[in-house]
Structures are given as C-alpha cells and as structure tokens.
Amino acid sequence: MANADRVRVRGLSIARPIVYGNSARLLTSKERENVPPEHTHRWTVALRSAASAPGSDIVGGADDLSYFLKRVSFKLHETYPNPVRNIDKPPFELSETGWGEFEVHIKLHFIPESGEKVITIYHHLKLHPWSLSGDTESIPPLEVAQKAGTVHSWQYEEIVFNDPYQNFLNILTNNPPTPIPRTNTSGRTIPFHIGNPASFESLKGGVPEFTSLLEKDEAERLDKAKKLIIAEQEKTRALLIAKEKELARLQKMLNG
Ligand code: SLL
C-alpha cells in the first residue's frame, strides 16, 4: 500500500447492507437414501448483499461482495466433520444435510486493504417451521413441516466501517450497493420479520425479500411498542402513588 492509501479518513463512516441466515427444507425420501439415516433436512447458510436480484428466488445476493470480503467462514456444530468451512469466493454460502438446529458462527474476513479485524456474527440455523404458538422448542410433525415448505430465517445488518483507509474507501465507493427496493419486487408486500411467526404465515411459500418499506414498518412497530411501554409505566406509577396514599392513610389510622 502506498503511504497516501494508509491515511485514514477520520470522522467518516461508510456502510454496506448485508443479509445472513439460512433456508431449509425436508429431504425427499429419494434424497434420504444417499445421506446418513438420521439426516432429515437440506439447508443453506449464507452471507449475501441485502438486495435481491430482480426476479430471483434467492434472499439477497444481488451484489458480489468479494470487493470487500476475502473470506467467510462458517463454523458448524461439532457433530459435522471439519466443522469450520472456509468460503473464499462468492457466493459466500454453504449447503449441508442434517437433523438438528444449532448456532452457526459466521466469521467475516475483509480484504487486506481494509485493515479491518475479523467480525463474528451468530445465526441460529433454523430447520423447523415458525410456530404460531411462539413455542420455539417444539418440533412440528412431519406433515406440518411438509406443508410449510422452505423455512427461511434471515437477518438484515449493516457493516459499518469507521475512519476507513483512503484506499479502502475508494474501493467501497467504486462499488455502490444495489439499493433495496421500497416494496417487494414480486409485487407482494411481505411483512417479513425475524421472530414474528405471524408474518411468515402471510408469506405462503413465497421468498422473503428485504425492502425499505419493511424497515419503515419495523420502525413504526418499535415506536408503537415504545409508546405502549411508556403508557404502561404511567399506569403503574399512578397505581403506586395511589397505593402509597392508601398506606399512609392506614398508617395514620393505626397510629391515631
Ligand atoms: C441439538 N444442539 O441437539 C443441537 C445439535 C446438531 C446437528 C444439533 C449433523 C450431524 C451429523 C447435524 O444435524 N447436527 O452429520 O452427524 O438439536
């Protein structure tokens, strides 16, 4: 690196939107013939650009992220042979078969020009359909899983680079991310939201896509929740004051 490239651009932050997560589906009986007998699912865990390619049935992945990512390593459960799987070129994803859910450790290695340290993110590999009861422990019967089709669990995130090296900043600005669309490009607005099983119902076998409208929805949801909490706090406070008054009154009675 030339000296001028080693200069950090102080006070500047630049971000890149990503999605990470997994899709999973049941193996067909034919497919089960070629895997260990206890394996029931095929899954794909991936780290991709946030925007989906037009018309694609893949979650995210419109942009090739190798302009800033050198390697993505996925650390699987130790029941897998060679649990650390290094992916050194796009697509940064991994498919396997298995029977159980576990925490995948995803390590992002950036290109040397970035001078950035490795980032580790965690993803709970999801195999079983989102339950509407909110009971995440229960594994649904096979018929239910079959009907649910492909299970998706994805998280939107922004990788923020603070005070980037000039050289790295140039690389980033030369590779602007595809903006996420305002609404789902398939024409459906999917209230897709991690951990909100109700919204997965409305997906009806479709492929989730991250949109800015989704972000707005999420912000509104948080705002509503915050207002609700404040109202609850106010109610509790009023109750407390009333109780304290009552206590004082009773104490006075006792003493008097
Ligand atoms: C569980 N804590 O007990 C989890 C562990 C491990 C999943 C799940 C493949 C293993 C293999 C596999 O699905 N491991 O190939 O033997 O549910």
Image (cartoon, rainbow, N blue to C red):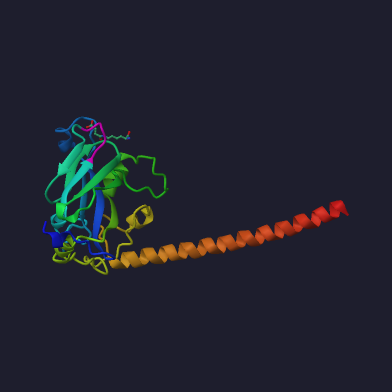
In the current view of this chain or complex, which residue is farthest to the bottom? 182
Q: Residue at x 17, y 33 (%)?
A: 35
* 108 to 169, vertically: above or below: above
Please identify the quadrant where the N terminus is shown.
Answer: bottom left
* 15 to 20, vertically: above or below: below
Which secondary structure type mostly characterizes the magenta part of the structure? loop
In the current view of this chain or complex, which residue is farthest to the right? 256
Residue 48 in sight from this viewpoint: yes
Q: Residue at x 12, y 51 (%)?
A: 90
Q: Position of residue 25 (x, y in %)?
A: 23, 45
Q: In the picture, residue 173 is in which quadrant? A: bottom left
Q: Is residue 222 left or right of residue 9?
A: right
Residue 62 in sight from this viewpoint: no
Ligand 1 - quadrant of the structure image: top left
In the current view of this chain or complex, which residue is farthest to the front? 3
Q: Residue at x 77, y 56 (%)?
A: 248
Q: Position of residue 57 (x, y in %)?
A: 18, 57
Residue 165 drawn in magenta: no
The answer to which of 5 and 95 lies nearer the viewer is 5
The answer to which of 169 and 134 lies nearer the viewer is 169
Q: Residue at x 27, y 65 (%)?
A: 12
How many marks overall? 0
Q: Position of residue 188 (x, y in %)?
A: 27, 65
Stretch in magenta: 75-80
Q: Is residue 194 left or right of residue 178?
A: right
